[in-house]
Amino acid sequence: MSNSKPNHVRPDPDSVPPAVVNRLSLYLRELQHLVRDGEATTSSSQLGRRLGFTDAQVRKDLAHFGHFGHPGIGYRCEELVGAIRSILGTDREWSVALVGVGNLGRALLGYRGFAQQGFRLEAAFDADPTKIGSMLEGVEVHDIAQLAQVLADKRIELGLVAVPAAEAQAVADQLVSAGVGGIVNFAPVTLKVPEGVSKVGVDLARELEQVTFAVANREGSRVPRVHSPKSD
Amino acid sequence: MSNSKPNHVRPDPDSVPPAVVNRLSLYLRELQHLVRDGEATTSSSQLGRRLGFTDAQVRKDLAHFGHFGHPGIGYRCEELVGAIRSILGTDREWSVALVGVGNLGRALLGYRGFAQQGFRLEAAFDADPTKIGSMLEGVEVHDIAQLAQVLADKRIELGLVAVPAAEAQAVADQLVSAGVGGIVNFAPVTLKVPEGVSKVGVDLARELEQVTFAVANREGSRVPRVHSPKSD
DNA sequence: CATTGTGAACTTATTCACAGCC
DNA sequence: GGCTGTGAATAAGTTCACAATG
């Protein structure tokens, strides 16, 4: 049975700032660590401190979705885990397909963190005939030409795009036609997807660039060849 | 010789909102596509349209760093590529070390996109004796006990953490002691790093959760498989 | 005359601060 | 005492709109 009784408010998702959703998943991760450490309750200030946010930020974020805290007590960890999972939709399993079984694709197939959060990788696709038909990490690699068929059969809901940049848009189009509700794109391109399909882009080089910006602009000027003497 | 006179303003990096830096790397990526497509110039509105921002947003972001445009013309693509690479610090190569040669680590070693943007993966580390000493993708896997030594020898500036969550903080501490300026963390934990070291976290399950939020909360207005008019 | 760069207006996000509750 | 939830205050970010410009 589908869960018909969410005990949280369900605002229009577009009315929730993406930054809030992003932090929500951080709260969830931190709460799951707390649960594993045997903590029964926590507080907005503890959560905030561990993540680098203010206590007010934590409370305001949660307030978008309801009243989860207990004045004088804080938040019961398992309770809040359940609430946030319900908000994020991860209180159930999701069927996911992977397109592109190269380097990165194979790593995604083997990544344990997906299963731990309820994501089941149920199909993989590639265009390379030498890969088609093989099993990787218990998942069969299908011909990409079979994408629509297999996605329908397996009722796949989400897609991971791990193909070269040049093919990413075509793959995304096929995933959308096959009815996926969302895509995580690992190719370094901006995908065009229709309204009503959500997407997230993960570009590894761009992540490094966020770091180099801070490093390059931090100390003195650009004299990288010299190993700076760390006196402390 | 090339270490002087950047022809852009260098504001205190902490005074630049992270969102701006994030968009900057998107502009760069898009500009590089335009260059490959043979475009000589572009405009804030073209750039914005392709990325889903307003033209004013693009201009304001760039204005943090100087005057790169030409009224009536727009931006010369190569010129702006050069300027943004200088701002992000990717107008030179960076030496990067990888810690953790599991599934994901091996994929990172093989990822071509790093080299394309000037990131050189020069050393890899693992604690597993069966991996130590092997070569993967042309990179030697060292004993993690040798981390400080190897990082100093190779003048490594950035670290990639791809170890299990339980070990990520210890690894980050070692990287920081060894003098790296920044870390990209692929383990699903929030790392503590000192002031003056920058970090970015990439959590694959969290990326998927951003998508499920949108999909799960869109449900109920389940749109039948209607052909939607193409919009851009 | 298409386009930039930018102050001003506006919108959104964050923090403050405190009433109410345990 | 400690803590949440929230309106009010503040800060930050975005868009508008237009003078300046090649």
Image (cartoon, coloured by chain):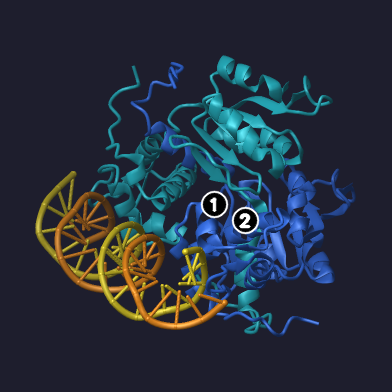
Chain colours: A blue, B cyan, C orange, D yellow
Which residue occupies 62% across, 56% down?
A30
What residue lies at 38% left-to-right and 40% top-to-bottom?
B84
The answer to whether dots 2 and 1 both sit on one chain is yes
Quarter of the rendering containing residue B14: top left
Location of residue B52 in the rendering, given as x and y in whole percent from the top left corner = 45, 62
Does B114 sit above or below residue B145? Answer: below
Report x, y in % for residue B106.
73, 35
Residue A11 circle label: none
Q: Position of residue A43 (x, y in %)?
A: 55, 63
Q: Is residue C8 left or right of residue B80?
A: left
Which residue shows up at 78% across the image and 23% down it? B132
Would you call the spot at circle 2 few (<14 residues within 10 Å), some (14-19), or many (20 or more)? many
Q: Chain of mark 1?
A: A
**Residue B118: x percent and y percent?**
52, 30
Q: Which mark is residue A50?
A: 1
Nearest to N terminus: mark 2 or mark 1: 2
Is residue A34 rendered to the left or right of residue A141? left
Frontmost residue, B6 versus A72 = A72
Of residues B151 and A157, the one nearer the viewer is B151
* Residue A121, placed above or below residue B100: below
> Does B28 sit left or right of A47 as displayed?
left
Q: Circle 2 — which element?
A: helix
Judging by the rendered image, the residue that carries numbered circle 2 is A30
Relative depth, front residue between A212 and B179 = B179
User: Mark 2 touching mark 1, by CB under 8 A?
Assistant: yes
Q: Chain of mark 2?
A: A
The amino acid sitting under disc 1 is Arg
Figure check: A214 above or below A194: above
Split into 4 quadrants, where in the image is the N terminus of chain A? bottom right
What's the amino acid at mark 2?
Glu
